[in-house]
Image: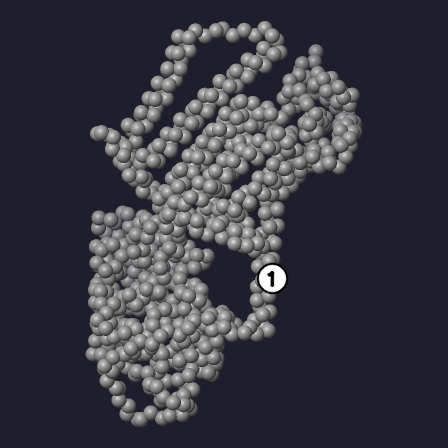
């Protein structure tokens, strides 16, 4: 079936809309692949519709081709890594499907421009491809629904502003006129102009076609000739209206731009996304102990500091082998507002916190047990109050003023309330199976077994205590100007001797720590003195992680908290805050979950009074050892990661079996993904077939015989429509039946008229007879084409579309209400 000029005119509009959408999305990606994807969408979308029209495809055939070409286009253009091999291509197909669900999060969380990183191009391709396909289908189908192509074009072009940055293009100065966001404004006005031109041109083409058809049918249609002057006036008036609209847009845009700041979705604060963008506070722990931060004020705390043991900055509940971070799928990673502010209980402790020059960001210092939102003060009070969120487990609070990660700043202050005495709980309960894989932490498992303890809460405390006693505090690799301040402070307390230690809390780093402790204990022999067991230099970053992993090994849930301690004057490796909290007061501790569900703190700062000692196995140290004077301490190379050792060693039979199992699971996931795609493709078919079956059964089982008889007629018309038998739109039932030229249709039309207009209502027998006629006619219609005709009829949506086009839920010309009063 050929396309008329109106359809081609509309397809050109679709191509223009895709081009504008591509230009709109360019700042998001800044990569030439965007141009390729836009071109592919402009060709494939309308191309599929045109091919389907010429080849007579049904809707389900067009859908299959569309899905297949989407996968091919996405794999070839939107997922660059998919072109490296067959397996990569299968993975790319999976990314093309999964990207429809998760790709939007990447768009909002990654820094711009995105380039062609992983599968970030998939959402753009999906939008312009689907938009071009649907818009082209509506235009080619014609009718009133074709105008919906314009809002679809708007949605395609809106992809750039919605998912892009809030910053617009640089203003354009034209004489004395400053035009803000000229690129965005130009694209918007271009879409407006294209839409107006398309709609006006479409109306004229439709009118010209109608006149041609009328002349062809009657040969006597006359049209009053419009004078040249009238045509010129009409065209000039239309152009003037369009020019005024464009000029008004150019003049209003500068004024409107100053009314409010533009915001994009990536700027709308989703605290969960903001937190996921942040670097792990534990990974940057050592930065607090450098020369520029260790003695600098982060914030001040006044009020009932003696009633609150700790202030929390961040609670990290997930460990991936590289670092502790906030999980995005647990209560610790879901954030919401607290509905109230102020003191909840008269016994609550009240603190006032003022942010200093060296502290900023989203992590908000709060005490444990926060039950109400803080009361902010200062110039930014209202904005900060609107930006405060707390995790669902009440363990972490953030203040996110925008999506880029801005939050608290110097001078911000707030009052906060929390239960007094929180943090005094004792760990209780008995552990169970290990919550970590011992094969990934062999040194940890070996050290714990070496300690000969059980799996109770008391054993957890005992092991963490041994970690603290046998570790040695060190915040740096080398003794230099950056580390001088904290070294001097420790030296004043206990004659500190510097030991080098590396940062990080990956599995490799913690395994090195546990291996050092185990080897030292073996060398020390039986009944060793405490100083002979000291072996592992490190700080809160490593030892809080080690404590949390030990708790998990014994079957207790655990997490790591970064924060400060309050109101404790006792000497410590990391001292408590005395009103002013500096970088040197930042500490980290582990928390384990008791049997009653409460979280209990496990202090993990290692001791610093007894330095590590190098001994041979069985050697006995002197009773009064002296600490040697160390002029310098050169750092040693870090140990190789365990993964490198594992790669160089041959795999055991068990490891090979695990590798085969992992490959099998990957294959199963891929098969499941493909099956899910197939189900999604077939879902409309299933729904359509089920809808027809339910519709037919509902009509047949109508409680009123009259309604059932009318339902038989409507089912007959739907059967003809789905079988591609042309059914007239207008006329009475009898007129329609006679024009169809089918005897059973005529008999059924007469039966329906008797049921509707007869003096006496019909009975069940007449309803059964009407449906028997319908069944016979339906079998005759469908039986002529065999199984293929039956399948085509079941999958055809024509009967549903006919009712939508008629603007009513029932067939035009087929009244269902009784009109007995019309019979005299």
- Measuring from the top left, give residue 579's x and y in whole percent: 21, 65
Seen at 69% across and 35% down, the residue is: 792
Q: Is residue 665 left or right of residue 759?
A: left
Seen at 31% across and 55% down, the residue is: 362
Disc 1 target residue: 664
Residue 544's place in the image compared with 357, above or below, is below
| Residue 658, picture quadrant | bottom right
Residue 416's place in the image compared with 698, above or below, is below
Seen at 25% across and 79% down, the residue is: 632
| Residue 734, picture quadrant | top right
Residue 145's place in the image compared with 216, above or below, is below
Q: Is residue 126 visible?
A: yes
Q: Say which of 621 and 74 sits in front.
A: 74
| Residue 259, picture quadrant | top left
- Measuring from the top left, give residue 194's x and y in whole percent: 42, 27
- Measuring from the top left, give residue 180's x and y in whole percent: 28, 35
């Amino acid at each position: 079936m050929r396309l008329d000029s109106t359809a081609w005119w509309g397809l050109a509009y679709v191509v223009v809309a895709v081009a504008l959408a591509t230009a709109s999305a360019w700042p998001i990606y800044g990569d030439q692949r965007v141009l390729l994807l836009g071109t592919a969408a402009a060709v494939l979308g309308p191309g599929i519709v045109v091919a389907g029209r010429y080849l007579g495809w049904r809707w389900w055939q067009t859908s299959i081709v569309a899905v297949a070409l989407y996968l091919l286009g996405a794999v070839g253009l939107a997922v660059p890594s998919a072109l490296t091999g067959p397996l990569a291509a299968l993975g790319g197909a999976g990314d093309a499907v999964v990207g429809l669900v998760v790709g939007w999060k990447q768009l909002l969380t990654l820094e711009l421009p995105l380039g062609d990183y992983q599968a970030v191009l998939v959402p753009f391709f999906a939008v312009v491809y689907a938009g071009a396909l649907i818009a082209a289908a509506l235009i080619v189908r014609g009718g009133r629904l074709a105008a919906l192509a314009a809002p679809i074009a708007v949605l395609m072009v809106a992809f750039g502003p919605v998912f892009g940055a809030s910053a617009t293009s640089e203003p354009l100065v034209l004489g004395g006129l400053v035009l803000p966001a000229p690129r965005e404004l130009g694209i918007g006005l271009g879409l407006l102009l294209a839409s107006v031109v398309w709609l006006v041109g479409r109306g004229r083409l439709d009118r010209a076609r109608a006149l041609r058809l009328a002349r062809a049918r009657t040969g006597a249609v006359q049209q009053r000739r419009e004078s040249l002057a009238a045509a010129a006036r009409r065209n000039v008036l239309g152009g003037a209206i369009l020019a005024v609209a464009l000029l008004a847009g150019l003049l209003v845009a500068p004024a409107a731009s100053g009314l409010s700041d533009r915001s994009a979705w990536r700027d709308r604060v989703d605290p969960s996304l903001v937190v996921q963008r942040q670097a792990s506070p534990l990974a940057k722990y050592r930065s607090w102990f450098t020369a520029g931060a260790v003695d600098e004020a982060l914030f001040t705390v006044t009020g009932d500091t003696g009633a609150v043991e700790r202030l929390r900055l961040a609670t990290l509940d997930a460990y991936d082998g590289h670092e502790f971070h906030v999980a995005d799928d647990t209560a610790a990673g879901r954030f919401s507002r607290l509905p109230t502010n102020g003191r909840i209980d008269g016994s609550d402790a009240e603190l006032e916190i003022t942010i200093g020059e060296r502290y900023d960001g989203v992590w908000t210092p709060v005490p444990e047990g926060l039950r109400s939102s803080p009361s902010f003060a200062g110039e930014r009070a209202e904005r900060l109050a609107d930006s405060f969120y707390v995790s669902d487990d009440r363990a972490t609070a953030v203040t996110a003023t925008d999506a880029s990660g801005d939050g608290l700043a110097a001078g911000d202050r707030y009052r906060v309330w929390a239960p007094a005495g929180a943090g005094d709980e004792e760990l209780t309960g008995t552990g169970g199976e290990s919550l970590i894989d011992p094969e990934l932490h062999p040194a940890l498992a070996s050290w714990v077994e070496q300690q000969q303890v059980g799996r109770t809460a008391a054993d957890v405390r005992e092991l963490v205590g041994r970690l603290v006693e046998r570790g040695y505090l060190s915040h740096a690799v080398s003794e230099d100007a950056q580390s001088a301040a904290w070294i001097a402070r420790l030296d004043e307390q206990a004659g500190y001797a510097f030991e080098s230690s590396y940062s990080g809390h990956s599995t490799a780093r913690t395994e090195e720590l546990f291996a050092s402790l185990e080897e030292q204990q073996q060398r020390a022999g039986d009944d060793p003195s405490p100083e002979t067991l000291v072996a592992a230099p490190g700080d809160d970053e490593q030892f809080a992680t080690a404590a949390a992993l030990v708790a998990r090994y014994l079957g207790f849930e655990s997490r790591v908290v970064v924060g400060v301690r309050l109101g404790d004057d006792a000497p410590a490796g990391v001292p408590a805050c005395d009103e002013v909290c500096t970088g040197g007061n930042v500490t980290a501790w582990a928390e384990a979950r008791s049997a009653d569900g409460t979280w209990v703190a496990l202090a993990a700062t290692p001791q610093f009074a007894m330095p590590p000692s190098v001994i041979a196995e069985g050697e006995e140290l002197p009773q009064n050892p002296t600490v040697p004077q160390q002029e310098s301490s050169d750092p040693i190379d870090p140990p190789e990661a365990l993964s490198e050792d594992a790669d160089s060693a041959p795999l055991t039979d068990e490891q090979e079996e695990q590798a085969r199992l992992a490959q099998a699971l990957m294959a199963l996931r891929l098969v499941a993904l493909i099956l899910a795609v197939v189900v999604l493709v077939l879902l409309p078919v299933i729904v359509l077939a089920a809808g027809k079956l339910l519709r037919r059964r509902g009509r047949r089982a109508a409680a009123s015989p009259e309604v059932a008889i009318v339902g038989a007629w409507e089912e007959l018309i739907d059967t003809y429509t789905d079988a591609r038998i042309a059914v007239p739109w207008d006329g009475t039932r009898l007129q329609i039946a006679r024009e169809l030229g089918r005897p059973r249709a005529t008999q059924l039309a007469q039966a329906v008229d008797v049921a509707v207009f007869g003096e006496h209502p019909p009975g069940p027998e007449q309803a059964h007879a009407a449906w028997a006629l319908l069944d016979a006619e339906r079998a005759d219609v469908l039986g002529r084409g065999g199984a293929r005709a039956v399948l085509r009829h079941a999958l055809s949506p024509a009967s549903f579309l006919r009712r939508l086009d008629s603007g009513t839920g029932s067939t035009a010309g087929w009244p269902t209400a009784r009109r007995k009063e019309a019979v005299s």
